[in-house]
């Protein structure tokens, strides 16, 4: 292994890439890992509500986590098989109550997340947070913050306010900022008669939610193009939220790479936003024909996203979060593949001679740039990756699956019935 690494390192260094520096940088980049891959986005409320909001998990692979101890055990198993620094991304629907206690979404308090905060502290994870505007009876006709029914709109504004306060309390407790991301499903199946009215109501709702200055909270809004059952119109469109964020200092525009038309690339949007915003939050996912939230793989667009983050020195400005949910395979393995893919893409990007490539572009030498780009594709990347995994004390590519399988046999498969 050491020999292979030294040889690979020499190849990269010949191109002017500083490999040790790349490894040092990579281990400090936090990846916010979504808790919802472990339980198919169901949460802990047990109201018997199915997943709604135009998003879907498909598959019934055995072993879904059903409660806090199962979900956190699975999360920890997955994290032990992945290198790098982690945060945990929570949804309000993962609130926890004392026996006999209950609080609806518009009455949630920081103490309902005390166990999560303790878990994050114990493991040195930062926390990110999401209000849950779906899978709830107050989502009426697929509408929340843009509803024409004032009591519905109000309920969800209150939910947004609770969640920002919870985020601030978590930030205070952990002495570390919390990203609080507003995504709503609101939209219409068929051609609307009024496209502006709902957006004006959403704007008013957001103003109400963001009115309070709350320390430690990084606010953001997540747009989307369509949802299942809401194919014709999405209230929170890209233009809507981008304009909202641009005109509201302190509110950022989150880019989910499953939320655009298929030939629109988030890798190209990142540098556009970096020109205007000091932070760009991401939801990294893998859309297959639609916003299907497949497990993130080490693919072209993921590499391109990572390159835009790295070569623009934006590792601290782009807040990387994962967002996928596959119920058709081992859920722990799904997490492992997704996190490892993100880490691989960042390493791949860190191993590019970016300055040299920019120079070639500025000198209009697109021939040399093309040749160099192609050369990079067959460089001994895997040897550097294996070394990184080893130094991080996590299994290599050929080893982690067996450990996930053992966990499946010993733990996950005993959950049925
Ligand atoms: C839905 C959005 C949203 C959700 C999570 C569960 O299309 O991507 O981010 O996936 O909040
Ligand atoms: Zn998302």
Image: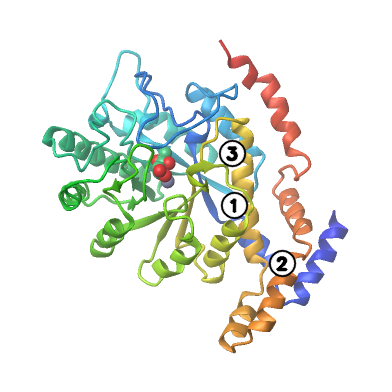
Work out whether 79 lies above or below 405: below
Q: Earlier in the sequence, mark 2 or mark 3?
A: 2
Could you tell me which residue is drawn at 48 percent across and 32 percent down? 57
Left or right side of 4 for 105: left
Could you tell me which residue is drawn at 69 percent across and 20 percent down? 410
Q: Residue 358 carries which label?
A: none
Q: Is residue 124 visible?
A: no
Residue receiving disc 1: 342
- Secondary structure beneath label 1: helix
Position of residue 301 measured from the top left corner of the image (x, y, whole percent): 57, 58
Left or right side of 346 for 275: left
Position of residue 268 measured from the top left corner of the image (x, y, whole percent): 48, 66
Disc 3 CB within 8 Å of nearest ligand 1 atom: no
Looking at the rendered image, the disc whose residue lies closer to the viewer, 1 or 2, is 1
Given residues 294 and 355, the one toward you in this image is 294
Residue receiving disc 2: 19
Looking at the rendered image, the disc whose residue lies closer to the viewer, 2 or 3, is 3
Q: Which of marks 1 and 2 is nearer the N terminus?
A: 2
Residue receiving disc 3: 335
Q: Which residue lies furthest to the left in this view?
A: 150
Work out whether 153 lies above or below 353: above
């Amino acid at each position: 292994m050491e020999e292979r690494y030294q040889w690979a390192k020499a190849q990269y260094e010949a191109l002017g890439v500083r490999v040790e520096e790349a490894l040092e940088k990579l281990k400090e980049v936090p990846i916010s890992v979504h808790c919802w891959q472990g339980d198919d986005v169901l949460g802990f409320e047990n109201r018997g509500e199915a997943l709604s909001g135009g998003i879907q998990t498909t598959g019934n692979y055995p072993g879904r986590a059903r409660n806090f101890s199962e979900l956190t055990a699975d999360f920890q198993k997955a994290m032990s098989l992945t290198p790098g620094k982690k945060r945990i991304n929570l949804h309000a629907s993962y609130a926890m109550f004392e026996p006999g206690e209950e609080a609806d979404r518009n009455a949630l308090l920081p103490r309902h997340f005390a166990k999560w905060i303790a878990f994050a502290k114990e493991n040195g994870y930062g926390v990110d947070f999401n209000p849950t505007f779906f899978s709830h009876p107050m989502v009426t006709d697929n509408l929340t913050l843009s509803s024409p029914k004032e009591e519905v709109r109000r309920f969800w504004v209150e939910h947004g306010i609770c969640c920002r306060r919870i985020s601030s309390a978590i930030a205070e407790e952990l002495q570390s900022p919390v990203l609080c991301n507003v995504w709503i499903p609101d939209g219409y199946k068929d051609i609307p008669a009024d496209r502006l009215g709902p957006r004006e109501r959403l704007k008013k709702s957001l103003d109400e939610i963001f009115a309070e200055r709350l320390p430690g909270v990084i606010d953001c809004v997540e747009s989307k193009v369509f949802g299942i059952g809401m194919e014709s119109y999405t209230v929170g469109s890209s233009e809507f939220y981008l304009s909202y964020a641009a005109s509201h200092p302190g509110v950022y525009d989150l880019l989910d790479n499953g939320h655009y038309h298929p030939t629109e690339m988030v890798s190209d949007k990142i540098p556009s936003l970096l020109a205007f915003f000091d932070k760009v939050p991401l939801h990294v996912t893998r859309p297959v024909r639609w916003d299907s939230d497949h497990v993130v793989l080490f693919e072209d667009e993921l590499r391109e996203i990572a390159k835009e983050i790295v070569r623009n020195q934006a590792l601290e400005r782009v807040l990387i979060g994962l967002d996928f949910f596959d119920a058709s395979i081992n859920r722990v393995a799904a997490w492992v593949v997704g996190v490892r893919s993100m880490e691989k893409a960042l390493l791949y990007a860190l191993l590019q001679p970016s300055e040299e490539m920019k120079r070639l572009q500025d000198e209009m030498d697109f021939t040399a740039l093309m040749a160099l780009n192609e050369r990079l594709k067959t460089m001994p990347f895997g040897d550097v990756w294996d070394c990184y995994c080893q130094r991080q004390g996590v299994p290599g590519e050929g080893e982690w699956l067996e450990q996930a399988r053992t966990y499946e046999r010993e733990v996950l498969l005993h959950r049925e019935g």
